[in-house]
Amino acid sequence: MLLRGPLVSILVFRGMQEIAVWRVAFFGMNRSLSAEIERHALQGRMLQESLRVHLPDAYVGGRNSVYYQQTKPPRFVAPDLYVVLGQSAEERPCYVVWEEGGRFPDFILEITSKDTEHQDRGRKLILYRDTFRTSEYFLYAPGIARLSGFRLQDNDYVSILPNERGDLFSQQLGVGLRCEAGWLHWVTELGDKVESSSEQRVREAERKLQEALAELERLRNSPDQFQA
């Protein structure tokens, strides 16, 4: 049956409405996903930078591949952040366990999402526990601001309890993690934030600026200083 007239117009209009709704939903979802990925990456970079200041004699990696088994092809995984104590802090495009004296990461952090949490708490947890023998494994779910950690004891991961401030402390790293306003920060045992090198430079610049302003104010209130 060939449709003509108003009925065709109605069907076409409804079809265009459905396409428009689909396009809005699709591109809106893409923008949301892109923002989540960017935030995820920024959080990892912030944690890496500040931890490198605290651990100058350790390798702090993240978002690069850890090759752990010489199969064909070799097996690898890419944690969001990991630390190998006692290894050179030199940058690497990837970390190859058999080229690093068989040293596996001592600490691993995964930043999870609703799409990855199942494998982060399942397959990866088993891998880090049984193959890597990683001493501490932390997970952070930014969507619900949930931070959890495990410590290897007697061949199993045991949950790490937060301290009185709510921080999760790492025995391996000598610092803890704190969640504030949806962001993770490294903190000392006393609760002070571990600053990155860029944060230290900003704080030093602000200190010098305040000193200069105070000196200017002092001179402004001391007219004798300008008399010959």
Image (cartoon, rainbow, N blue to C red):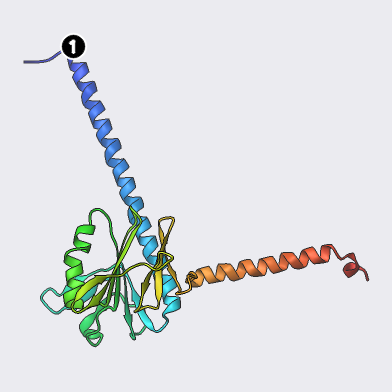
Question: Is residue 113 placed above or below 27 in the rendered structure?
Answer: below
- Image quarter in which the N terminus is found: top left
Identify which residue is drawn at 83% across, 62% down.
220
Residue drawn at x 64%, y 69% is 207
Indicate whether 16 appears above or below 104.
Answer: above
**Residue 157: horizontal and vertical position, in percent?**
22, 72
Residue farthest along the bottom direction in this orientation: 101
Q: Residue at x 36, y 51 (%)?
A: 35
| Residue 170 found in image quarter | bottom left
Q: Residues within 10 Å of mark 1 (few under 14, many from 20)?
A: few
Q: Up-down: is 206 above or below 54? A: above
Q: Can residue 207 be seen from the camera position used here?
A: yes
Q: Percent position (x, y) of residue 67? A: 21, 76
For image coordinates 12% across by 73% down, the residue present is: 73
Tell me the quarter of the picture where residue 109 sits.
bottom left
Please name the amino acid that badge 1 sits on. Gly
Viewer-nearest residue: 177 or 120: 177
How many numbered badges does the structure rendering display? 1
x, y percentage for residue 52? 42, 76
Residue that numbered label 1 is attached to: 5
Outermost residue, right side: 228
**Label 1 residue SS:** loop
Task: Answer with left or right where residue 81 lies relative to residue 209.
Answer: left
Q: Is residue 119 above or below residue 10?
A: below
Relative side of 194 to 12, left or right: right
Residue 46 locus on image (x, y percent): 42, 66
Closer-to-camera residue (185/71)? 185
Image position of 156 (left or right of 212): left
Residue extending farthest left: 1
Residue 97 occupies quadrant: bottom left
